[in-house]
Amino acid sequence: MKGLLKNEFFTMRRVILLYAGVLLLYYLLGVFGTQMAGVQIFSVFFCTMLVISSFSYEEKSGWSTYVNVLPVSRSQIVFCKYLFAVICMAVAAAFGLLVQSGMNLKNGDPVFQDVWVAGAAVIVASLFLSVVLPVLFKVGAEKSRVVLVLIFLIPFAVALVAEKAGIKIHVSAEQLLSLLPAMGFGVAAVLLLSCAVSMEIYKRKEF
């Protein structure tokens, strides 16, 4: 398992450095601007793209065929992908919290003001991964491009329908903050269920 995780980071090291450079630029813009919350959300979702990119790299290099003759189980291969995705999201969220807390101190605001934004971003990004990863394990990165686009469009379609129907949901920051723990546990359960589904898909896959 440790070797599989190391392979993920070593394979993606150049892409990770590129992503880190882009995120650093966005955070600099956020520090000197007023949209730090948006930058935090973007950074978490941006880092979830790393695991999708890793599927493309593996398909092109033939790693998927090679790894299945190594002394590792298919369940470990799947779990490693989920762990890699969670680590990427956690690092992005932690860095966002650090920057936000530093800005709060500099501006004389409460240290933990608006730090819930990173947690909310992780929750939504985890839901996204819960849907995307089983699809990637089923059909691969190249064949799943259309499906991924449709998944991205679903939230916008729902918001558009709600707007046309005159449905308005008002949730204050305090209410959202109080719901975050329950939402976090719920999303963790969904992510574990997604992992179990992906394991079943991958066990039945032929290479």
Image (spheres, helix red, strand yellow):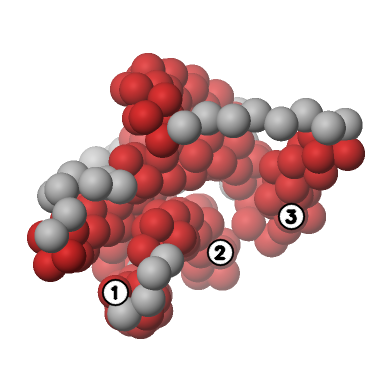
Pick whichever of labels 1 and 3 is earlier in the sequence: 1
Q: Residue at x 49, y 39 (%)?
A: 124
Residue 56 image label: 2
Measured as percent of width and height from the top left, residue 86 is found at 34, 44
Residue 67's place in the image compared with 36, above or below, is above
Measured as percent of width and height from the top left, residue 155 is found at 70, 42
- The residue identified by callout 3 is 149
- The residue identified by callout 1 is 31
Q: Quick one: quadrant of the N terminus?
A: top left
Disc 1, SS: helix
Corner quadrant of residue 177: top left
Horizontal arrangement in the rendering, residue 65 relative to residue 147 (left or right): left
Across the whole image, how many numbered discs are drawn on residues?
Answer: 3
Residue 77 seen by the camera:
no
Disc 3, SS: helix
The extreme front residue here reads: 108
Measured as percent of width and height from the top left, residue 90 is found at 28, 48
Q: Residue at x 32, y 41 (%)?
A: 116
Question: Which mark is in front, 1 or 3?
Answer: 1
Who is closer to the viewer here, 74 or 170? 170
Horizontal arrangement in the rendering, residue 154 relative to residue 69 (left or right): right
Amino acid beneath label 3: Val
The answer to whether mark 3 and mark 2 are in CB contact below 8 A is no
10 Å neighbourhood of mark 2: few (<14), some, or many (≥20)? Answer: some
Amino acid beneath label 1: Val
Pick whichever of labels 2 and 1 is earlier in the sequence: 1
Horizontal arrangement in the rendering, residue 207 relative to residue 68 (left or right): right
